[in-house]
Image (cartoon, rainbow, N blue to C red):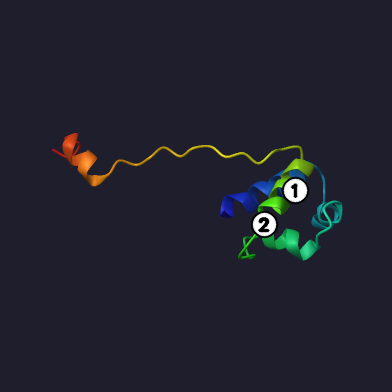
Amino acid sequence: MEDLGILIKTLRKSAGLSQSQLAQRHGMSRATISGIENNTIPEIGIRKVAAILEGLGYELTATPNPRRMTLDELKAGGVHD
């Protein structure tokens, strides 16, 4: 999730917004935006993240991660022979 904070900070700066301006747009405190950007908030609600991203012209999406092979699959495939 560290990358999320960096992304939001980058998008916010690209939009020419201060943390206070972004916070005000979404009914949050500047400290909340700072915490998100600096990865110091332990739990960030998905709705907050989606709202911030949408406000910056982006959308939150999910993409599948490629599944890692199991040890048995690696052995069967002769990957480490």
Mark 2 secondary-structure assignment: loop
Left or right of 51 on screen, residue 75: left
Q: Which residue is mark 2?
A: 45
Image quadrant holding the C terminus, namely top left
- Reply above or below: 28 against 59: below
Left or right of 44 on screen, residue 52: right
Which amino acid type is shown beneath numbered disc 2?
Gly
Q: Measuring from the top left, give residue 8's x and y in whole percent.
A: 69, 48
**Disc 2: CA contacts within 10 A as few (<14), some (14-19) or many (>=20):** few
**Image depth: mark 1 or mark 2 in front:** 2
Which amino acid type is shown beneath numbered disc 1?
Ile
The answer to which of marks 1 and 2 sits earlier in the sequence is 2
The residue lying at 80 percent from left, 62 percent from top is: 30
Image quadrant holding the N terminus, namely bottom right
Q: Measuring from the top left, give residue 47's x and y in whole percent.
A: 71, 51
Q: Which residue is mark 1?
A: 52
**Residue 32: quarter of image:** bottom right
Q: Measuring from the top left, give residue 45's x and y in whole percent.
A: 67, 57
Q: How many marks?
A: 2
**Residue 35: quarter of image:** bottom right
